[in-house]
Amino acid sequence: MPQKILLYCDPGIDDSLAIIYALLNPEIELVGIVTSYGNVNQEQATQNVAYLLELGGKEDIVLIGGAKTPLSGEFTPYYPEIHGEEGLGPIKPPATIKGELLNFDAVFKLIEEYGDELIIVDVGRSTSLAISFNLAGAETMNSVKGFYIMGGAFLTPGNVTAGAEANFYGDPIAAGIVMEKAKNSVLYPLNVTKEAIITPTMIEEIVKEDNNPYQNLIKEIFDYYFKAYQKLIPGIEGSPLHDVMTLFAVTTPQAFKYVEKVVTVGLDEGNLRGVSIADFRPKPDEKGNKLTIALEVNTDTFAENFVKTMSSPISNNH
Ligand code: RIB
Ligand code: CA
């Protein structure tokens, strides 16, 4: 049986590749997508998802409008130099595509409908997921099968500041709420997702096939993303697909090594903003909500699975 997934995201190039990955993966059934601000604004994120769904003839997948700002209400920067002005690298989705956007309570209808068969995957800022906990309460939210969350960086450099990862930095208050309240949660921090390196050679292999309607788009958005990463990290051989790795983890959890820890998130406006903290001492005094944190990954398994999935036809699950 494919895993039923409700995806919270902010497309964004790696979010877009994650959506395509989900649509092409026979082990995943995407039942809904919550679109929020993050890599681009919320309206643009929605338009990008609607465009991707239309390209694949999957307009039936439920689209839900998520947060437009962090819980603090402040403006947080977008990243056009990495994701492009519209979030899809050089591609501008046609203005005619809008997509029917459902109100936020559609999240709770999906939870009611699928119950403990539903997995929530959050690869964007944590705002919309924190709001879900606020509106529905922890008991309802924790009635799902579990949460897979991309965020944080433990004892390793951040990607927005020296210590902070972008999703946690974007809304540290929300990230803290999710870390405190979400049970059955697995966290995929930069420790593993920075290893989700996809190279131009792998993309060439994917586009050789003509099995799905996404091949041209995959190449164009990847090339843009790779150029951006080459500027950031000269000599890098490929680009990390953080969000794809988090979805891959749902179907291939055995590719990772994990620890269990309580996680807190720095709220300070200075160097500690968005920094994820866990106690790695030999005998930590842990009280609170323990999360499973992925700290190592088998990168060959990921790369192989990515090339195979992205070269496949659209699955009929959705
Ligand atoms: O830090 C990586 C995360 O931030 C990913 O979700 C990516 O989309 C970026 O916004
Ligand atoms: Ca993202």
Image: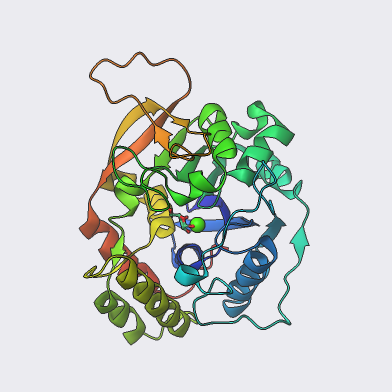
- Answer above or below: position of 59 versus 35: below
Is 157 situated left or right of 161 in this image? Answer: left
In which quarter of the view is residue 164 placed? top left
Query: How many numbered tags mark residues here?
Result: 0
Q: Is residue 116 left or right of residue 297?
A: right
> Residue 64: image x %, image y %?
70, 56
Coordinates of residue 3 in the picture (x, y in percent): 49, 50
Examine the rendered structure and indicate whether residue 312 appears above or below residue 296.
below
Nearer to us in this view, 194 or 233: 233
Q: Is any part of residue 245 visible from this angle? A: yes
Give the image quarter of residue 307.
bottom left
Q: Which one is nearer the viewer's eye here, 90 or 61?
A: 90
Q: Quadrant of the C terminus?
A: bottom right
Q: Is residue 311 visible?
A: no
When the figure is inspected, residue 195 is found, relative to residue 203, above or below; the finding is above
Residue 195: x %, y % from top left: 27, 55
